[in-house]
């Protein structure tokens, strides 16, 4: 599945909120501690990690490909 975002990057926390997986920063921290999120094949635990155009994120069985527009603004 493709996820589009504006700007040069989106953080892990912002992505989880955009996908309606969590609703707050505290929930992001707990979610990441459970070890269910992988970025480009590696487990990720930092909610502030910057995700870039072309990165792949796997959450459970779902894989997302990120498509950013560095010239756009929110």
Image (cartoon, grey):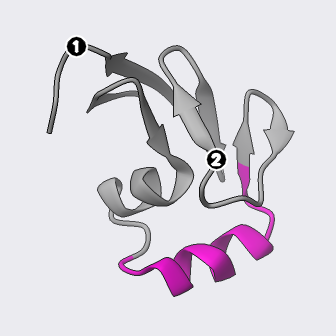
Which residue does the numbered mark 2 point to in the structure image? 49
Q: In the drawing, does residue 15 fall left or right of residue 74?
A: right
Instruction: Name above or below for residue 25 compared with residue 38.
Output: below
Q: Going from the N terminus, do you reach mark 1 or mark 2 first?
A: 2
User: Where is the N terminus found, in terms of image quarters?
Assistant: top left
Q: CA distance from mark 1 to mark 2?
A: 20 Å
Residue 24, given in percent of the width and then of the height, sits at: 41, 81
Residue 23, given in percent of the width and then of the height, sits at: 35, 78
Residue lying at 43% horizontally and 50% vertically, measured from the top left: 15
Q: Nearer the viewer, residue 36 or 8?
A: 8
Q: Nearer the viewer, residue 4 or 64?
A: 4
Query: Which span of residues is magenta-colored?
Result: 23-37
The tally of labels here is 2
Instruction: Name above or below for residue 74 compared with residue 70.
Output: below
Q: Nearer the viewer, residue 59 or 51?
A: 51
Residue lying at 74% horizontally and 27% vertically, measured from the top left: 40
Q: In the drawing, does residue 73 fall left or right of residue 53?
A: left
Q: Nearer the viewer, residue 47 or 65?
A: 47
Instruction: Name above or below for residue 48 compared with residue 22.
Output: above
Q: In the drawing, does residue 44 fall left or right of residue 47?
A: right
- Mark 1 is surrounded, within 10 Å at the Cα level, by few (under 14), some (14 to 19) or many (20 or more) other residues, namely few
Residue lying at 47% horizontally and 17% vertically, measured from the top left: 53
Which residue does the numbered mark 1 point to in the structure image? 71
- Mark 2 is surrounded, within 10 Å at the Cα level, by few (under 14), some (14 to 19) or many (20 or more) other residues, namely some
Residue 65, given in percent of the width and then of the height, sits at: 49, 23
């Amino acid at each position: 599945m493709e996820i589009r975002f504006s700007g040069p990057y989106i953080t892990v926390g912002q992505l989880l909120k955009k996908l309606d997986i969590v609703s707050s920063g505290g929930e992001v921290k707990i979610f990441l501690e459970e070890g269910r999120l992988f970025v480009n094949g590696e487990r990720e635990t930092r909610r502030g990690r910057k995700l870039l155009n072309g990165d792949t994120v796997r959450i459970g069985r779902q894989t997302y490909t990120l498509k950013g527009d560095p010239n756009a603004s929110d």
